[in-house]
Image (tube, grey):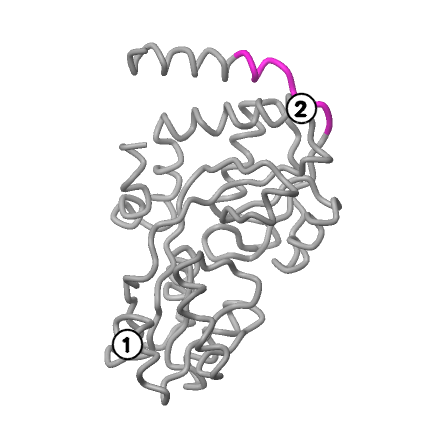
Amino acid sequence: MKPAAAAALLALAASQAATAACSRELQVGVSDLGYSAFLRDGRIQGVVPDLLDELARRSGCKLTMRYMPRARVQLEFEQGGIDMLTSAMRAADRDRVGHFLPYAYTELDLVAATAQVPQSLKALAAKPELKLGIVRGVRLGEALEARVAPLLASRQAEYSPDFNNLAAKLVAGRVQAGIFPNMIHARLRREGQLPAGAVVVDLPEAGTEPIGLYLHRANVLEEDVRQLQAQLALLRREGWLQQLYARYVGEAEARRLFRNEAVR
């Protein structure tokens, strides 16, 4: 099938899906994750709330956000207390619980207090005087997990409960580098929460990873999953999602994140 015909069929399917709302209101877990989601003046703002608003507008589904710490969001989703997990990397244990609907990408970077910190985790491991910080409960992907595991075992790496705490450790010199998703370190830098001389290292061990929504298999009907999936696919094809990211992190960073989107 020609690309134009395929796009037309996709648009038609999405249009038809949008004529009926979801079977019920869906509860969505949202956490403070940099520009992905944050509280400002008592309102939840960021990429995820904007995406959920657009999904609700196009599909007619009612998507109610519940703002809570990331660890609680993940626990509530696993236990069926919420219907949707957002800003999620794909993982086998999550696949057992939910349907994965990708919508964008994430890049995990090394944020170092100074430019003298090594440019890879392999090089950092050779300098035991340097300590690495990571946030508990954040998925790193297989390649990074393999590099971080021995650092945790040797206590050259340590956990933080959240990214604000990890940023504070960098400023205080308790760790010399930390692993942050790009959406988070971009906001922390803009708000002055990172060390003045902090540098961002594009880790060779980390690639661009798809992120998406997880819809709970036991809670969400198949027809609702198909409807939201069709709308997400249309938003990606239109380039709407890349434009959304660009509003928060700039055109250059959005192009870096979506550099593989054109060849899907």
Whether residue 122 is situated above or below residue 31 in the rendered picture: below
Query: Residue at 48% of width from left, 74% of height from top?
Result: 166
Residue at the image position 56 percent from the left and 47 percent from the top: 92
x, y percentage for residue 46? 49, 48
Range of magenta residues = 16-24
Q: Which sits in the foreground, 188 or 214? A: 214
Task: Please state, as top left, top right, bottom left or bottom right, where the N terminus lies in the image.
Answer: top left
Q: Is residue 73 placed above or below 84 in the rendered structure?
A: below
Magenta span contains residue 74: no
Give the residue type that dot 1 points to.
Ala
Q: In front: 61, or 191?
A: 61
Q: Toward which corner of the image does residue 195 lie, by quadrant?
A: bottom left
Residue 14's x, y, as percent?
50, 17
Separation (CA) of disc 1 from disc 2: 50 Å
Mark 1 element type: helix
Q: Secondary structure at mark 2?
A: loop
Q: Which residue is mark 1?
A: 123
Q: Quadrant of residue 108?
A: bottom left
Residue at 53% x, 49% y is 91
Relative to residue 229, is residue 234 drawn left or right? left
In the rendered view, tell whether residue 167 sits above or below residue 82: below
User: What is the total number of numbered labels drawn onto the structure image?
Assistant: 2
Q: Which residue is mark 2?
A: 22
The x and y percentages for residue 221 are: 69, 26
Q: Amino acid at mark 2?
A: Cys
Whether 20 is among the magenta residues is yes
- At 69% from the left and 31% from the top, the residue drawn is 220
Give the mark nearer the N terminus: 1 vs 2. Answer: 2
Label of residue 219 in the image: none
Q: Quadrant of the C terminus?
A: top left
